[in-house]
């Protein structure tokens, strides 16, 4: 992940921007503005926007739009738009800028006609994507969530004419075998899709349907399992993190505590305390 840039332009004008190592994402942008208004401008990427506090009003193709909190706004590339606070307290927004690999140019017209999507599932998934993008080392989770978002957006903008066949267990098994081979090295969803000749969204749904767990959750579970064994062998948490494929020790700690209930250090120390007690008995 590229270094994050933090900029403060005055009271209640805060910006955080970074470029994650996730295919298809050109930038992540979080901002809190109270008075700032964007002039008319364009982006060369798709703008996927959610507002957490307040509301934004904007013009797109000479039509006025707004973004209440339960809305996901999708602004297409190369189409002029502006933006300004719609409430006295301004707005707090989170934006993901996407290149053309997730959404094609054939959807630009539909996005111009209806850029504000009131879809609770899509809103929840976009929030989950931002949480994953903010955590270095969770790129597979972000990639998985992004591909499901892309599928949802395409379904909303272009209703399906043909119902897809349900994913089969063989594809899920093949993905699990790939993940098992790459526990420490990791596996990008895009690479898995290429190796298994399947669409990324199809892969995620097949795996989740077969095993009741998302691919990124499975991979983290396998890594934590390996970490447990190394910790009980006396390997320090920092070295364990590196050996098991985590971004850093903090990344290991977060997932280890989530799955085991304690930090790696406490887990290792518990075994040492048990050994000392046994030697004194």
Image (spheres, rainbow, N blue to C red):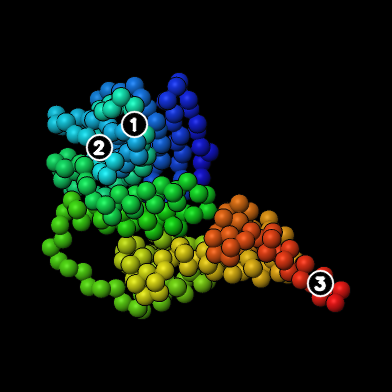
At label 1, counting other C-alpha atoms closer than 10 Å, the crowd grade (few under 14, some 14-19, many 20 or more) is many
Q: Position of residue 58 (x, y in %)?
A: 23, 30
Q: Secondary structure at mark 1?
A: strand
- First in sequence: mark 1 vs mark 3: 1
Q: Residue at x 77, y 67 (%)?
A: 273
Residue position marked by numbered label 2 in the rendering: 67
Alpha-carbon neighbours of circle 3 within 10 Å: few (<14), some, or many (≥20)? few
Give the image location of residue 215, x and y in percent.
43, 66
Considering only vertical position in the picture, is 82 above or below 138? above
Q: Residue furthest bottom?
A: 170
User: Looking at the picture, how far across and down is residue 238, in whole percent?
Assistant: 68, 55
N-terminal-most mark, 1 or 2: 2
- State the image quarter where residue 77 is shown: top left
Residue 235, compared with residue 39, is above or below; it is below
Q: Which residue has dot 3 on it?
A: 277
Q: Where residue 187 appears, x then y in whole percent?
A: 48, 62
Position above or below: 48 against 178: above
218 left or right, relative to 68? right
Reading the image, the residue beneath label 1 is 91
Query: Is residue 153 shown to the viewer in this render?
Result: yes
* Distance from the alpha carbon under mark 2 to that under mark 3: 61 Å
Name the foreground residue: 182 vs 249. Answer: 249
Mark closer to the observer (1, 3): 3
Work out whether residue 76 or residue 208 is closer to the camera in this orientation and state it.
208
**Quick check: 82 left or right of 174?**
left
Residue at x 69% of width, y 59% of height: 265
Q: Secondary structure at mark 2?
A: loop
Q: Quadrant of residue 26?
A: top left
> Disc 1, disc 2: CB below 8 Å?
yes
Is residue 235 among what the camera can see? no
Left/right placement of residue 146 relative to residue 41 reads right
**Residue lying at 22% horizontally and 54% vertically, measured from the top left:** 154
């Amino acid at each position: 992940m590229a270094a994050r840039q933090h900029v403060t332009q005055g009271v209640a004008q805060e910006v955080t921007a970074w470029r994650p190592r996730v295919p298809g994402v050109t930038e992540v942008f979080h901002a809190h503005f109270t008075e700032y208004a964007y002039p008319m401008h364009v982006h060369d990427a798709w703008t996927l926007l959610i507002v957490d506090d307040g509301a934004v009003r904007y013009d797109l193709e000479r039509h006025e739009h707004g973004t209440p909190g339960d809305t996901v706004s999708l602004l297409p590339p190369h189409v002029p738009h502006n933006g300004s606070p719609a409430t006295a307290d301004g707005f707090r927004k989170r934006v993901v800028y996407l290149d053309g690999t997730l959404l094609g140019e054939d959807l630009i017209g539909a996005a111009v006609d209806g850029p504000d999507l009131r879809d609770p599932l899509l809103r929840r998934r976009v929030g989950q994507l931002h949480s994953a993008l903010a955590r270095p080392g969770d790129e597979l989770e972000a990639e998985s969530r992004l591909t499901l978002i892309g599928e949802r957006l395409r379904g909303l903008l272009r209703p399906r004419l043909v119902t897809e066949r349900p994913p089969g267990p063989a594809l899920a098994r093949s993905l699990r075998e790939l993940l098992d081979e790459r526990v420490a090295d990791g596996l990008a969803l895009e690479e898995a899709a290429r190796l298994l000749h399947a669409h990324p969204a199809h892969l995620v749904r097949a795996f989740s349907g077969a095993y009741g767990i998302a691919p990124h959750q499975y991979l983290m579970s396998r890594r934590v399992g390996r970490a447990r064994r190394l910790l009980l062998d006396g390997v320090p948490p920092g070295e364990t993190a590196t050996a098991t494929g985590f971004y850093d020790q903090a990344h290991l700690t977060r997932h280890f505590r989530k799955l085991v209930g304690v930090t790696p250090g406490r887990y290792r120390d518990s075994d040492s305390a048990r050994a000392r007690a046994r030697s004194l008995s």
